[in-house]
Amino acid sequence: MHELSIAMSIVDAAVEEAQRRGVQVSAVHLRLGALAGVVKDALLFCYEVACQGTPLEGSRLIVEDVPVIVFCAPCQKERVLQSVQLFQCPECGTPTMDVRHGKELEVYALEVQEDAVQESEVRE
Amino acid sequence: MSEPRLVEVRRNVLKQNDVIARSLREQFRAAGVFVVSLVSSPGSGKTTFLEKTLTQLQPRYRVAALVGDLATENDAVRLARSKAPVKQITTGTLCHLEAAMVQNALQDWDLHQLDFLFIENVGNLVCPSSYDLGENLRLVLMSVTEGEDKPLKYPTIFNSADVAIVTKNELASAVEFDWETARTSIQAVRPGMQIFRLSAKTGEGMEEYLNFLSQQLVEQRAVAQVLSPSVRQVQ
């Protein structure tokens, strides 16, 4: 069970990004790969605990599952693995370890309250 | 008015660990030490296997080990019988090693004095898969008593490893271990994975595996010698 320490890292990263932008966060969007080694339900449970006493208290964690996408050399195409128990092209059956996606553990966006944003601090 | 808005940030959550792991890998390469990490479930025979590995490599190589455990220094005491330098990393409640712990543990060791460094992770088939320790080779161990479908139950850790070691082979017939099923399971989650089937207790199969390690060290040093430092970084 390392989801609590992962949740704390997520909160740290989000707090830092929010403070740099001077925004209030209502939700954190996370991309979670099927090969990241993190259990989603445990992470959601731990997130609430990790937020306590931080500026993120009361915010939500929204997890986008990222499937494993491999590259199949014979097909010359990226393919979505149907199961992490079988690393082979779902079309032609060729075994492959050329993993293109699925290891993501990334805070990719923050949902912020617009009225908390100072125009001068918006750099995007 | 309060309108929610999405701000893209794109931050790798384990970036801090990855940065330290990269720096460790560069240190290992510069020192010419080949680093092997071991992961497995508790009780698969990691410590016995590592003790034999250290003992048998020692006449030819300078070896050392770091051992991770939640509590106790028992494993370090067992491994110290090999006469190799051994240091215990006690993680407390943490179920895995992180790159920073390896970095701290290595502070007072001169890596240039080593050929092989082994890092025994905490017995756990889930959490260690997320953390890069800067190692050159990750071994995943499974004993014949654990069931042939272990790789299918823990695909992520097998997928993250480079080589599989099937241990306690002296018990294979007693537990009716089905080698072909085990091999198929490993290849399903990690196509092309090299597998060594051995018994640390009887010594069966150890030589082939130790020769493989020696070969890895030779290859790593050849690569390090041929490439200039600037090219090595992108390797």
Image: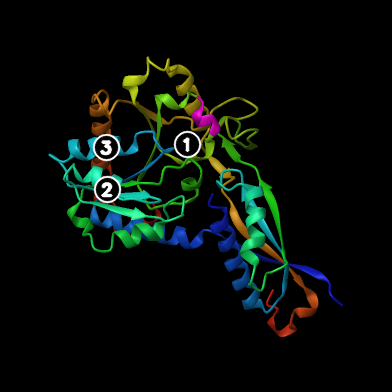
Quadrant in the picture for residue B172: top left
Q: Chain of mark 3?
A: B
Q: Is residue B62 left or right of residue A9?
A: left
Estimate the spatial distance between the alpha carbons at disc 3 and disc 2, rounded to whole Å.
22 Å
Q: Which residue is mark 2?
A: B76
Residue B107, percent from left and from top = 28, 63
Estimate the spatial distance between the alpha carbons at disc 3 and disc 1, rounded to whole Å.
19 Å
Q: Which residues are magenta?
A: B149-153
Q: Is residue B17 above or below residue A24?
A: above
Disc number for residue B158: 1
Point out the image quarter for the C terminus of chain A: bottom right
Residue found at the very far right of the displayed protein: B1
**Are the residues under marks 3 and 2 on the same chain?**
yes
Query: Which is nearer the eye, B217 or B141?
Result: B141
Amino acid carrying label 1: it is Phe
**Figure colour scheme:** rainbow
Pick whichever of labels 2 and 1 is earlier in the sequence.
2
Residues at discs 2 and 1 in contact (Cβ within 8 Å): no
Pick whichever of labels 3 and 1 is earlier in the sequence.
1
Q: Which residue is mark 3?
A: B213
